[in-house]
Image (cartoon, helix red, strand yellow):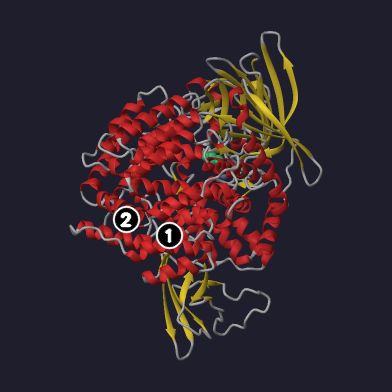
Amino acid sequence: MRDARPSAIYLKDYRPPAFLIQRTRLAFDLYEDHALVAATLHIRRNPAAEPGEALVLHGQELELLSIALDGRELAGQEYSLTDDTLQVASVPDQFTLTTRTRIRPQDNTSLEGLYKSRTMFCTQCEAEGFRKITYYLDRPDVMAEFEVSVEADRARYPVLLSNGNLVGSEVLDNGRHRADWHDPFPKPAYLFALVAGDLRSVEDSFTTCGGREVNLRIFVEEKDLDKCDHAMLSLKKSMRWDEEVYGREYDLDIFNIVAVDDFNMGAMENKSLNIFNSSCVLCSPATTTDKGFQTVEAIVAHEYFHNWSGNRVTCRDWFQLSLKEGFTVFRDAEFSADMGSRTVKRVEDATVMRTAQFAEDAGPMAHPIRPDSFIEISNFYTLTVYEKGAEVVRMIHTLLAAEAFRKGSDLYFERHDGQAVTCEDFVVAMEDASGVDLGQFRRWYSQAGTPVLSVNGEYDADAERYRLHVRQSCPPTPGQADKQPLLIPLAMGLLGDAGNLPLQLAGQAPDPETGDNTHLVLRVTEAEQTFVFEDVREPPVPSLLRGFSAPVRLEYAYSRGELCALMSRDDDGFVRWDAAQQLALSVLEEVEGQILGGDAPVVDPLFLDACTVLLEDASLDPAMVAEMLRLPGEGYMAELAARRGGARVESIHLAREAVLKALAEHAENAWLDTYRRNVVSEPYAPEATQVAARSLRNLSLEYLALARPEHIALARAQFASAGNMTDQLAALRVISQRGSDAQRDEALDSFYRQWQSETLVVNQWLQVQAAVPGEQALARVRGLLEHAAFDLRNPNKVRALVGGFANGNPLQFHRADGGGYGFLGEIIEALNIRNPQIASRLLTPLTRWRNYAGEQGVKMRAELERLAALPDLSPDVFEVLSKSLEG
Ligand code: B3K
Ligand code: ZN
């Protein structure tokens, strides 16, 4: 750590840059033990900034070899260096600054800046990695046109790539070669990219709506050439979709994607040169699950969509990160919904919000989607900024309706093309285009925490009137004790005996335009509000928060009978799923209470019957049935229990196991039938119908293995004969979770032998083992750290094994001796300096220490304190530790 205590920076302190860079010329010379970077920057004073300021460039871990101003070498006293800046005190209003620096990509383990991933050079500059490449104004509101030349050994690195168009290349006589690139679109440094490697590519083309022929290429290692088709198809679908839905056309003649193995996150939207974690681009039926195929499609789309929402219009500063990320996640979610099942996609996204984002909101790192301050921006690439940010954009879409929202996005792109702007600019464009006042709505950008909607209904049979009382509140979050009411779109209907009832809000004329009078979006704006419905002929069950219309926690005291009614008969798929989840949760909590009271668990037959009816109804979408019958996870149950006073890991686990087993046994025949009925006989395709069938079939397999040990035979047969990774991995999971030790070891060994040369499959193998139950789990995971297949430098492997253990094996992670926490702490300590971003991410499960009752919470905190006392903490780790231990 550079300073004793890294300090926070604040949104309120934003100042425009004192200087602007119009043109950036970079020349890279790549060697086996270092790289030379020559930078020529055409700089001028920013007329919009305070006059007379010194020139301060960012720079980290750079060796400055020379510096010249307008061609004149500067003497030592004319500039000064710190660990992260280069300052030149006296500069004219316009000048050219030339620097030569040496960097060591081979030693760069942070995977930020220019680094080596196996045999290739690659870059990751967002958010502040460019300053590890050369001295620069590394902030997103400084946008320059880039010219880049890359020189390297021709045999080792035949492919040399950067942003924009290839404008020249030359074979040099010393076994080296050079490529020259020019990107005509001014961009911030975070979108810069460079790749040099021995890569092959698959190629395709796309003709834009305006007739531009775009050359599309995906670069991979030779062995992976057969795994690019799905990403290529996804790219072409994304390009078409963005034209059709947003009127956005691609703007260059080439679009490149490169797959790299060592990457801190999923992918990066560098202008025309997207760099992807290989796990988010490579796909084949034999090695990739259905989920994997969907992830690749969604991430390819997400990065492509950034070309407009992020690159053409970028962020003024990193507090505005959600401007590009929230909007782009909303765009990719709608794309995925259009490509597959809209309801299933919505359920998946709502699950992430409720299980993980709400937990973030309730934890020590809680922040608004536009944070007010941060110590290390890398810590703010969060579910809040991304997923809640997308929900906020979705609410604007709901409030404006599709047509006005599209006018708003058109205006936003047109008004701000080529600019670095703020979330406020986005909201203003939406208001200007639609005439809708989003004044109160803006609080969603500044207020942290998950709002709670407490609702109750009151039926007056004589007056045929139904009143819906809505109260909104929001629990305090760090630094924000008092919360203001938000504008919350509450989509709803009223369910009667024979289906959804017509809605007539008091004082409001029926809307002759909309054919559908059974669905309404209420605008909740006050702390307390009552909505009155007239002509309600029977006591209804309210169907609330349809489509998860707002990222809030809904409280309504439904009876189990009402939940069964919603679950089987409501018009809205999300509400049906949600009712099933709530019913399951109430049963799980009841059973946990029995266990804690020393009683034998008794599972309400109403629940078991309702689930069986779902399973037996062949007319339902198998994907939705699977989602409805997947019980809430132990992590989510722990979050809920924490709000009732403290989670007990063991009783949560026992309760969930008891309910799973009861449902497995109660519906054994139906599970068996479902398993047999949902066989896919066509050749594998990652399309909705097949995905749905496999999803329900593999869920059936999980339940069957619990119903009766003999059914493990089904899993073993499926494991041996599976023709795709979805079915093989599902069977492996069941065997390793529910089979005997011998069955588990045999399956794991055979899986490894079959797939040892496929890195991404081996990572899945690591993850499956991390979740194996039983006392031996921690020793097994420790043993795997030494396995040839594991490498602490590779984030995918760390996430699979270490993350897989901490998040996927709750009982063993929270083992009573604290060994799970100590293990995680050791890994974090080992990565703290080597890869601060990954180290900091791994801390998340420990930051939840306040949720755990008794000794567990105490031991988690003790591990955080041990880490906090270490001498050299990276700012990333320091920030999470200090915030987790505050108060
Ligand atoms: N914008 C990148 C994320 C960069 C993360 C830097 N720590 C990927 C994405 O959201 O598309
Ligand atoms: Zn993004």
Q: Which residue is mark 1?
A: 450
Q: Is residue 460 above or below residue 559?
A: below
Residue at position x 48%, y 70% in the image? 543
- The residue under the point 45% across, 32% down is 763
Is residue 871 among what the camera can see? no
Image location (x, y in percent) of residue 400: 63, 65
Q: Are marks 2 and 1 in contact (CB under 8 Å)?
A: no
Given this view, does label 2 or label 1 mark the residue nearer the observer? 2
Residue 509: give x, y in percent of width and height. 62, 83
Instruction: Say which of 331 and 131 sits in front.
Output: 331
Whether residue 58 sits left or right of residue 664 in the image: it is right
Q: Within 10 Å of the Cα at label 1, are there few (<14), some (14-19), or many (20+) other Cα atoms?
A: many
User: Is 643 above or below relative to 694?
Assistant: below
Judge from the rendering whether residue 576 lies leftward or rightward of residue 785; answer left or right.
Answer: right
Residue farthest toward the bottom in the current orientation of the protein: 462
Which of 702/172 is in front?
Answer: 702
Query: Label for residue 662?
Result: 2
Task: Ligand 2: give its quadrant.
Answer: top right
Residue at left 39%, top 62%? 582
Which x, y percent locates residue 447?
A: 46, 59
Q: Quadrant of residue 506?
A: bottom right
Asked if residue 125 shows in the view, the reply is yes
* Residue kind at label 1, given as amino acid type: Thr
